[in-house]
Amino acid sequence: MAADADLVVTCARLVATCAGPAPRRGTAQRQIGALADAAIAACDGHIVYVGPAADLPAHVHLHHDAVRVDAGGGLVVPGFVDPHTHAVYAGDRRDELRQRIDGATYEAVAAAGGGIASTVAATRTASVDALVTAARPRLNTMLACGTTTCEIKSGYGLTTDAEVAQLRAIAALDAAHPVDTVATFLGAHDLPPEYRWDRTGYVTLVKDEMVPRVAQERLATWCDVFCERGVFRPDEALDILQAGSRAGLRPRVHADELSASGGAYVAVAAGARSADHLVFVEAAGVRALADAGVCAVLLPSAAFYLKLGRYAPARSLIDTGVPVALGTDRNPGGGLSPSMPFAMALACFAMDMTLEEALVAATLNAAWSLDLDDRVGSLEPGKQMDAVVIDGDLIDLLRVGISAIRIVIKQGRVVIPSAAVPGDP
Ligand SMILES: [Zn+2]
């Protein structure tokens, strides 16, 4: 019997479905499930058919007022899933990028009163409404770059009430914006100034007050910690992640971004779904992640804008069997780019990933890293109709500075092109 459909995408030279089991690791990360001359049909926001265009009439009954999307001989890929952002914040730190151009390091910027502390000061005074208003245009630009689902972290409040406000803003955005959002509690993003000399006191506050409140009010799915030299030690990070787990907040970790912090081992010990950044991960850490099945979420745009001079060892991670995902790390400091295609370009040209590996990393594996692979991350029947239509070939996605993205579909609705996309402050 033919399935009803209220949206159909035709005239695609190629559909990269990325369909199949997740996560993809090793050589399987190159499988993008390409179908030539394919069509996709959806009903009520969910895919009902992906297959040869010639077989569409036999399988699908199109409503008389169905939306018909002409892919114009281009390529269709799943909507991108961005598994690591800090897109909800107040204040403006673009000036720090200028300082970095002039040679300042991450630590030097922080020591001069910039960095996370400056965003914390601005975010603490912002209302939930103000945070939503500030973040909405950021989500608009992400959507214009093909991102249809993203993770957003708290971590700029660093008091219980301010963390809760940030998480409420994330929930409000999820309800009001086409991009679906997933919330991560990151109370352990930094030591706030009032606890600078009382590390134990702050770790206790995170564990005993913030975590229970966030869990009780169901404000986050995940709990994250910035495990880094000068921030949280591995033992503190593990302590916080375990408290989160006990309360039902699942662990993920900022690991080995600026130094070999031991974050990969924390991720393994905590049973984390992902270890993120990994610029300085050691070979033994790579093996430990592979053995434990932890996803590596790599954020090359952050390494680029922070001028770290190196990138995560993506080749070794994939070849050792670690599933690799990509994210933007959109944030007020070094996270200037909201673009998953830019992250893919860096993955290919700075981290030696193949184009196919980068696509799977930006879609199916990213979805798996958020445990959303049953709903998004690939184009297959039953999943959400989140798709991106590209002018040209897959390689055209990597053309930095000009977008190859022509159409973005979210839950069966064409959301780009839209009437207007306001700028990204
Ligand atoms: Zn981050």
Image: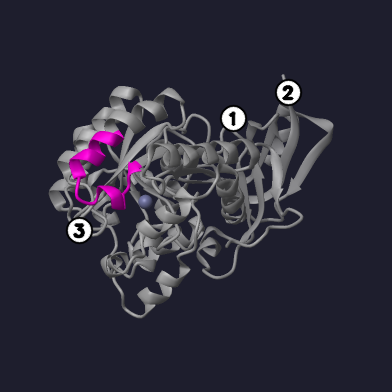
Which residue has dot 1 on it?
Answer: 381
Residue 259's disc number: 3
Mark 2 element type: loop
The span from disc 2 to disc 1 (Cα, nearest Å) is 13 Å
- Which is nearer the N-term, disc 1 or disc 3? 3
Q: Callout 3: helix, strand or loop?
A: loop
* Label 3 residue near ligand 1, CB within 8 Å: no
- Residue at 33% over, 40% down: 224
Report the front residue among 289 and 120. Answer: 120
Residue 367 on image: x %, y %: 45, 39
Task: Name the residue furthest bottom.
Answer: 102
Residue at 65 percent across and 36 percent down: it is: 411
* 193 relative to 179 in the view: left or right: left
Q: In this rendering, is residue 246 above or below 356?
A: above
Disc nearer the start of the sequence (3/2): 2
Q: Is mark 2 within 8 Å of ligand 1?
A: no
Closer to the camera: disc 1 or disc 3? 3
Q: Secondary structure at mark 1?
A: loop
Q: In this rendering, would 101 be left or right of 175?
A: left
Q: Position of residue 151 (x, y in %)?
A: 46, 42
Does the rendering let one see residue 360? yes
Report which quarter residue 344 is drawn in. bottom left
Residue kind at label 1, given as amino acid type:
Pro
* Direction right: furthest residue: 64
Label annotation for residue 2 = 2
Q: Position of residue 358 (x, y in %)?
A: 42, 53
Q: Is residue 198 magenta?
A: yes
Q: Is residue 329 visible?
A: no
Location of residue 203 with respect to 15 vertically, above or below: above
Q: Which residues are magenta?
A: 187-206
Q: Are marks 1 and 3 in contact (CB under 8 Å)?
A: no
